[in-house]
Image (cartoon, helix red, strand yellow):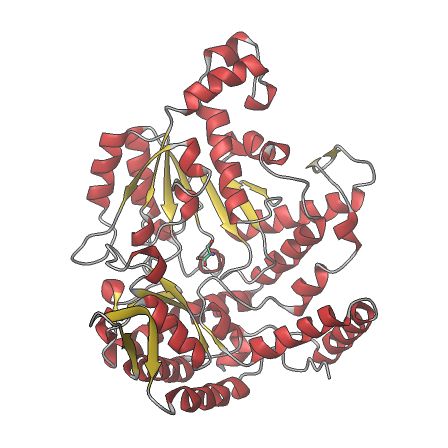
Amino acid sequence: MTAARTTHSFDGAAASAAYRSALEVIGAVEPRVADAISRELTDQRGSLKLIASENYASPAVLLTMGNWFSDKYAEGTVGHRFYAGCQNVDTVEALAAEHARELFGAPYAYVQPHSGIDANLVAFWAVLAQRVELPALQEAGARHVNDLTDADWAVLRRALGDQRMLGMSLDAGGHLTHGFRPNISGKMFEQSSYGTDPATGLLDYAAVRARAREFRPLIIVAGYSAYPRRVDFAAMREIADEVGATLVVDMAHFAGLVAGKVLTGDFDPVPHAHIVTSTSHKSLRGPRGGFVLAQPEFADAVDRGCPMVLGGPLPHVMAAKAVAFAEARRPEFAGYARAVADNAQTLAEGLTRRGARLVTGGTDNHLVLVDVTGFGLTGRQAESALLDAGIVTNRNAVPADPNGAWYTSGIRLGTPALTSRGFGAAEFDRTAELIVDVLSATTPTATRDGGTSQAKYVVADGVADRTRAAAAELLSAHPLYPGIDLA
Ligand code: DSN
């Protein structure tokens, strides 16, 4: 039953023929690339993929990206292009935007961003364009930031220096693009962050409100890449309104749960945020890319994402977004999204029951954050030991992480990809058992000064092989892209 409601449905023979032909054509030019593509499928088929931001797109989505749309330039917007001959690009961009609006119940959708960082940049520039009042802008009679002269820009740069952004701190699960130094958002804005309650690991809305009152940001960013709980977006909007901030929600990680109506009411960002940004390839299971949903007052400014911060749109990817959004509008996608969240609960319970310590004690979205210091390990050691055993995860900081952002103290586990393979409760409980087996059998290597290494480790004899065999058994019962045979 689980497999039927969560996996893609497609004609295996047709997809097989399509990929075989494609590889033959590619292989005639550079066989090593064709080989690498084949091997990537073999490798993905053969590992327990628990990276929370990854998934498996359908053959329809994947095939939509490999065609002549890739050759077309199309700067501008639907019906207003800076290049001739964009009639078919107009068709797919309009379709993708329409499906996105319908899927999320949003008044406006912009589907050109190439990635999540691009989507966030578009949103941040749109807020600046819409909200920063510049005497020079008015004196120049310019209606929009794109109409500024060089002299106006000098004024704008000074004005930007004063603008503030408040986002979730990185170690609490926020994202680099929410105003942090290594990213342009951290240079455009003076940044401050809100964290989580040290005792519970949960967002403390009273503390967010207090910080917002003190800091008076132009933008409050909500959303995360490693927070295992729901966010109350109605509460975040109330805080934003109180301090006159614009609420931007980055739903890249949980867009699939919004589309599938697992996150509704106060936990659905679309009715509460001024602007919502996202990627299309994580829990939403589409092509690599980004998009923006906005309230009408920001639509015009968001529409200018290209050329303000984006290069030419990628028509082949916009076409694939249209296909993926159409898939997500089908009733079975809601079943998939529900299973992603249910499976995360099973995984969390299975880990906890076997002694693992979870940040916040559990999950109510698609991801689980394990504090591996309970096993005497760093995140890096845990990630590597699990990879040796065929389990693909990524290390991640935990709140107030004593091991810093490189070694970290956690591993982040997500259920979207394996749920797409048809894994259900029994498989995720077994996966929890395998993870705890490996982590319990791993010990850090001693250093010469009597301490322990943060990177090196040993896994007890036989454990990695035993786990690989057990993982292979689970995976073979839930084949990836069944029916696609490249041999
Ligand atoms: N790289 C993505 C993730 O893994 O969460 C976010 O950008």
Instruction: Quadrant for residue 274, please give it.
Output: top left
Above or below, 223 against 357 in this view is above
Residue farthest along the left direction in this orientation: 199
Residue farthest along the top direction in this orientation: 139
In the image, what residue occupies the spot 65% across and 54% down? 322
* 448 sits left or right of 178 in the view: left
The C terminus lies in quadrant: bottom right
Q: Position of residue 484 (x, y in %)?
A: 69, 80
Above or below, 436 against 228 in this view is below
Closer to the camera in the image, 186 or 113: 186
Above or below, 33 against 70 in this view is below
Q: Position of residue 46 (x, y in %)?
A: 54, 81
In the image, what residue occupies the spot 32% across and 59% down? 397
Closer to the camera in the image, 240 or 447: 447
* 332 sits left or right of 85 in the view: left
Above or below, 180 against 459 in this view is above
Marks counted in the figure total 0
Q: Is residue 106 visible?
A: no
Q: Is residue 63 visible?
A: yes
In the image, what residue occupies the spot 57% across and 79% down? 45
In the image, what residue occupies the spot 44% across and 38% down? 185
Closer to the camera in the image, 453 or 356: 453
